[in-house]
Image (cartoon, grey):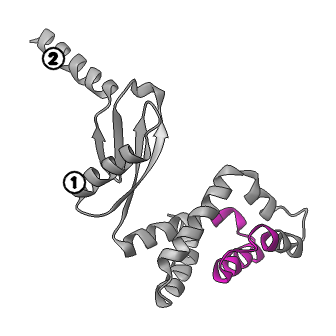
């Protein structure tokens, strides 16, 4: 975590926690993070010296017309302070704080093929039981897995991929060969 981004995230989090709107804000923050990740030049545009601060803020008003005013005002303050490139980190830090507040862990499911909603629901339920808390999982298709899935949550890796099983068999065979 970058200290500067963390302070902005903490300020938004404190404001939304006090007004009991952490979950609602987290939903909007996740949408903004997706926009930023899908459009990597967006932050560069908000940081460019070729546009005045007023022009950059007008872009924010237009792009984020329907978002919460507190979030929009935070984005404007960050731009006015010349720190637009920190926006993604600010929102990632806020998301972490919101997850902690809600008692939720986020993770990734790596699969060789797309996973149906029902399969994802079953995986989420199982991992939630193992982790002893609610879990939200995002699917990433990774053809190198050959088959099966791998779930990563914080420092925990639950690897049921065929690639992992092949590696385990290979290591077992090599170990026996060395005996």
Magenta highlight: main SS: helix
Where disc 1 sits, the SS reads helix
Q: Compared with residue 157, is residue 53 higher up or lower down, i.e. above or below? A: below
At which x and y percent is residue 143? 47, 27
The residue positioned farthest toward the bottom in the image shown: 18
Q: Which residue is mark 2?
A: 175
Q: Which residue is mark 1?
A: 130
Q: Which of these two is toward me, 168 or 112?
A: 112
143 in the magenta segment: no
At which x and y percent is residue 38? 67, 50
Residue count near mark 1 (Cα–Cα under 10 Å), binned few <14, some 14–19, many ≥20: few
Q: Compared with residue 60, is residue 166 higher up or lower down, i.e. above or below? A: above
Q: Compared with residue 115, is residue 5 higher up or lower down, i.e. above or below? A: below
Q: Does residue 65 appear to the left or right of 74 in the view shown?
A: right
Q: Residue at x 34, y 31 (%)?
A: 148
Labels 1 and 2: the sequence-earlier one:
1
Q: Residue at x 48, y 78 (%)?
A: 22
């Amino acid at each position: 975590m970058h200290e500067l981004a963390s302070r902005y995230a903490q300020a938004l989090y404190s404001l939304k926690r006090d007004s009991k709107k952490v979950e609602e804000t987290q939903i909007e923050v996740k949408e903004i993070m997706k926009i930023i990740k899908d459009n990597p030049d967006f932050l560069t545009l908000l940081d460019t010296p070729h546009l005045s601060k007023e022009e950059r803020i007008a872009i924010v008003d237009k792009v984020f017309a329907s978002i919460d005013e507190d979030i929009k005002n935070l984005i404007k303050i960050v731009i006015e302070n010349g720190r637009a490139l920190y926006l993604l980190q600010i929102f990632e830090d806020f998301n972490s704080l919101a997850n902690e507040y809600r008692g939720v862990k986020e993770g990734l499911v790596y699969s060789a093929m797309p996973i149906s909603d029902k399969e994802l629901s079953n995986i989420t339920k199982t991992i939630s039981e193992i982790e002893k808390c609610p879990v939200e999982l995002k699917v990433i298709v990774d053809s190198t897995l050959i088959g099966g899935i791998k779930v990563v949550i914080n420092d925990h890796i639950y690897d049921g991929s065929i690639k992992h099983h092949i590696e385990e068999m290979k290591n077992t065979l090599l170990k026996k060969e060395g005996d």
